[in-house]
Amino acid sequence: MAGWNPLKNTNPNSGDPYAPPNDGDSPNDEMNNLIQQYKPLIQKMTFSSFMGYCSGITAKKVGKSMAFVVGLAFIGLQGLVYKGYIAVDWKEVQGSVVKAVDTDNDGDITEKDLQRYWSKVKAILTNNMPDASGFGLGFIFGLRA
């Protein structure tokens, strides 16, 4: 900072006369560079896509939490089975789960079943939203974040 005069305000963004000059290394400049880099994406962002993004992040977190709880329950049950306290017929459990989740009643959980569930979830989440396609794109980005 050669030639910097602390008595002269050289930073036009500061009300502090003793502030150092804005030499391009401030966080504001980094943010401006980031905004410029993602300007095309930001211009396309809509309220619906933002809500989709937030919903996707939430779905990811909830899904991980549910997987944790199911895994913990399975480990607990398997421990009890191993010790001989209880007996679990896992083939019957599997049949019950498939029957409850299978939407096309073909006896398997397939891509078609997942597409039907996605359609139901999307219909609920995009109800009365101005841009459903933007929501879907935002949701996918949220899941990948």
Image (spheres, grey):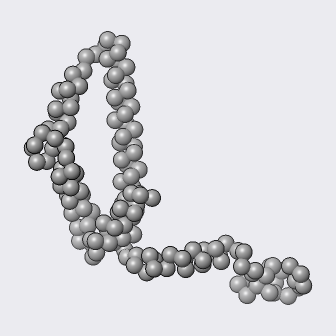
Viewed as shown, does residue 13 lie left or right of 113?
Answer: right
In the image: residue 33, left or right of residue 145: right
Residue at the extreme top of the image, as rendered = 84
Residue sitting at x 39%, y 52%:
60
Question: In the figure, residue 98 lies in which quadrant?
Answer: top left
Q: Is residue 37 above or below residue 109?
A: below
Query: In the rendered image, is residue 114 in sight?
Result: yes
Any part of residue 124 in sight: no
Horizontal placement of 134 versus 108: left or right? right
Give the camera-side residue of 86 and 82: 82
Q: Which residue is drawn at 16% across and 41% down?
A: 108
Q: Which residue is drawn at 45% across and 58% down?
A: 145
Q: Where is residue 136 in the image (x, y as percent from the top left)?
A: 30, 66
Residue in the image at 37% along x and 36% along y: 69
Q: x, y (%) of residue 1?
A: 86, 79
Q: Which quarter of the picture shows residue 42?
A: bottom left
Vertical placement of 116 versus 50: above or below? above
Determine which quarter of the picture holds residue 46. Answer: bottom left
User: In screen coordinates, is 18 left or right of 57?
Assistant: right
Residue 37 in picture, x, y percent from top left: 54, 76
Q: How many marks?
A: 0
